[in-house]
Image (spheres, grey):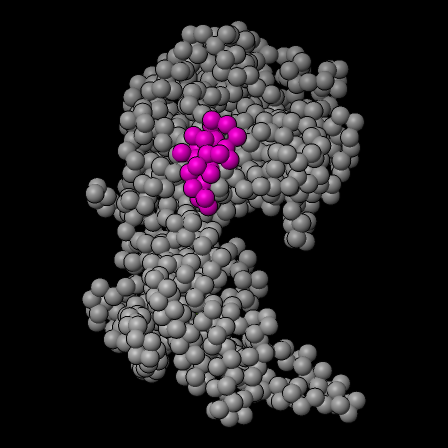
Amino acid sequence: MPKYVYRFDEGGKDQRDLLGGKGANLAEMTRIGLPVPPGFTITTEACRAYMRDGRVPPGLRVEVTTALRQVEDALGRRLGAPRDPLLVSVRSGAKFSMPGMMDTVLNVGLTDASVQGLADMSGDERFAWDSYRRLVQMFGATVLGVDARAFAEALEARKAAAGVGSDVDLAAADLRALVDDYRRIVRATCGRDFPQDPREQLDLAIEAVFGSWNTGRARLYRRRERIPDDLGTAVNVVAMVFGNLGDDSGTGVSFTRDPSSGHAGAYGDYLPNAQGEDVVAGIRNTLSLDDLRTRDPSSYDELLAAMRRLETHYRDLCDIEFTIERGRLWLLQTRVGKRTAAAAFRVAVQLVDEHLITLDEALARVTGEQLGRLLFPRFDRTADTPLLTRGLGASPGAAVGEIVMDNMQALARTRAGAKVVLVRRETNPDDLAGMIAADGILTARGGKTSHAAVVARGMGRCAVVGAEALDVDEARGEVRVDGVVLHPGDVIALDGTTGEVFRGEVPVVDSPVMRYVADGLDAGLRAAPDGEVRELVHAVHRLLTHADSVRRLRVRANADTADDARRARARGAEGIGLCRTEHQFLGERRRYVEQVVLAGSDDERQAALADLLPLQRADFTDLLEAMDGLPTTIRLLDPPLHEFLPDLTELSVRVALEEERGQADEHDVRLLAAVRRMHEQNPMLGLRGVRLGLTVPGLFALQVRAIAEAAVGLRRAGRDPRPEIMVPLVGSVREMQLVRAEAEGVLAEVAESSGVPLEVPIGCMIELPRAALTAQRIATQADFFSFGTNDLTQTTWGFSRDDVEGAFFSEYLENGVLTISPFETLDADGVGALVRIGVERGRSARPGLHCGVCGEHGGDPESIHFFHEVGLDDVSCSPFRVPVARLEAGRAAVLAGEDTTV
Ligand code: PEP
Ligand code: MG
């Protein structure tokens, strides 16, 4: 039978799968001698058994009894004993942090009998009854399922009866009466009494925490954060320590460095005379660690020593929850702290400079997604939009949007296409849906470690918290600030770095990191407003340069114009992986396509194509010039020709009207016949790609000639063009053979007539399952492969991208068929298997065959790791994503454990 319970001195930080993050780290802190209250962890395996069988696994009770007895012996107190009782907290803690999404029950063990023991022990009767009423309330709501509003109403009634405005003014007798009220509520709604057996309380609380893995908000959070649904949560049972025993007690959250800017040095929030959840709930505004130093220097020193210890032990920024009980420090939690993108880069490089980690490790600790966030625009500081108020910048970014005040408004307005800012007094886990929908979050209460701040940072949402001047009147749907009254729909702008809140829209400008990737280090440094941002630009530069030195994957860009190509090159692209030539056939040039389609004879068609030649030659000259010296893959025309022709319905109406007036235009009539002839039910699977090249004589030859002549022209001008020709939608080697023969003929002819030798590789896209499966044959005719994972995803799943994403993906994500759109992140099991087969079979016929990818997945971090692993040579993505791909390709090499020393 598996072991379900681990004492804190039995586990360690590497057991997060089994003990959850919180449990593993409590064990680790215990092991290295930091002051952690005694306790034990019930494993995630027990939770999985509970979810599977609908009851706690046999044997768990006995193990809990043994572990509890050891805690009791260590402290010399018994759970819920009438004299000097031990109380415990029962806390959730999954492998991945899910802040506030699951349940916790504090003060377990308090009963009518033990409440007096607690009063005697603490010498504070009010405290004892307050703890008891909190237990009945929390236990009632989370374990027994009582509507929390019933408790809130009873509390309000008691306050009114006592004539006080706040709960802290209720006397012991009031609280005692409140406990009676609460217990009546429990009896009336549940048909049972609040349990007076401490052990029964503990068992029910454990079960409730298991169950809270599957609450709606927990599931929503997991879906967003892509945390698997079947991991389950561990449960930590910890001896209670109290931060609310008077002014020499308190509770707080601290970080070993500032999680928002990455600034070195301890950072945190402290609330005197309060219990743990009060800080995170953001209900009262907090003091700083400097205030703690003044109030209680010895606890402060001990806390700082513990923080230093943790940072050198974990070799990373840690966050810590602590409680001071009558001058004694206890650590209740630590973990490697969530941080903003800027902090991630700065902290990683600081730790390298402090010799705590290597550059490889630093690279592994930042992500392409974080780099992407640093590339977002910032507010233009020179604009004169009126400042509304100011709060704490808790999660950087620039958000502009309409005010919404609850989840429903947030969802309704974003569905209608609006950008919104969620404005709340404070947020709690039930606001998650609105927080996800919003571009920014603004709260009136709470510190940088409040729920809103932590969740927003985790999601990369811009947030300003603790804007105290705001009066958020949720009942009236009004936000008042300094005489200004705002309503849902009014536009505001938040700066998540400075904490400024503006009324109306503020224009945006490039971020300094964007300037850096686009124009180089000097430009980035010049754009930085202060030393901190300069440090950030340097940190990004250092890690990106390191990524470049260790990555094996080359990074190219998908670019169709010379402008895009130059942009990509400036961002570090090492070539063009895909130029979609169809984009050169739009606008004015559509009429040439019409001529090709309407041509009555070969000669007519050739004449129409000949008109296109100089235009295409100029396109390719520009592109190859911009990419001088770098490989430039030009794809022959891919979409069906009818995409360049008028819409069937519009044209039918036009011709019908013309005919009615007796003025039928002959060109229109012929065009309509052609459009009808070419109309396809399923164009994605129809006459496109190589099929078009083989059925419209001269079309591909024209493009090949234009490429060849552009290359010759540039060579003569002393340049170094490196074109590569790519054939789309190949499914059979014979197709490739035919196109290749034609293309080689044209290349040879141009080389001969110009006297300039041309070596132009001819390869193909692998974007149909059949191409991947017969890659060993196709490779005999292809100089390179490029996986078109957009079409390969469509054809492997049988999904028409344009149709299915809007139609049913939300249901598929909801019911777990998909965890993310396969068009965003490569479906490694299915589509990825075909990529793997394509590479292996292709290289079996042609060793060393160059393989790349040019579907959207080439810029997606997770997919890049997959492409590295299957041994591709390069990824190609949009110019904007190139720095992200460079970084992730470096991370892929480091994380795959390759020897990156050069
Ligand atoms: C692909 O299919 O992955 C691809 C790059 O081609 P397109 O998106 O142009 O069809
Ligand atoms: Mg394609």
Q: Residue at x 63, y 77 (%)?
A: 647
In this picture, is 325 found above or below 651? above
Q: Is residue 122 left or right of residue 150?
A: left
Q: Position of residue 742 (x, y in %)?
A: 34, 82
**430 or 401: nearer the eye?**
401
**435 or 325: nearer the eye?**
435
In this picture, is 483 found above or below 405? above
Is residue 584 shown to the viewer in this render? yes
In this picture, is 553 found above or below 126? below
Q: Is residue 749 left or right of residue 184?
A: left
Q: Residue at x 49, y 34 (%)?
A: 526
**860 or 808: nearer the eye?**
860
Which quadrant of the figure has residue 11?
top left
Q: Residue at x 48, y 31 (%)?
A: 533
Q: Which residues are magenta?
A: 516-538
In this picture, is 612 found above or below 397? below
- Per the picture, the main secondary structure of the magenta-coloured stretch is helix
Which quadrant of the figure has residue 485?
top right
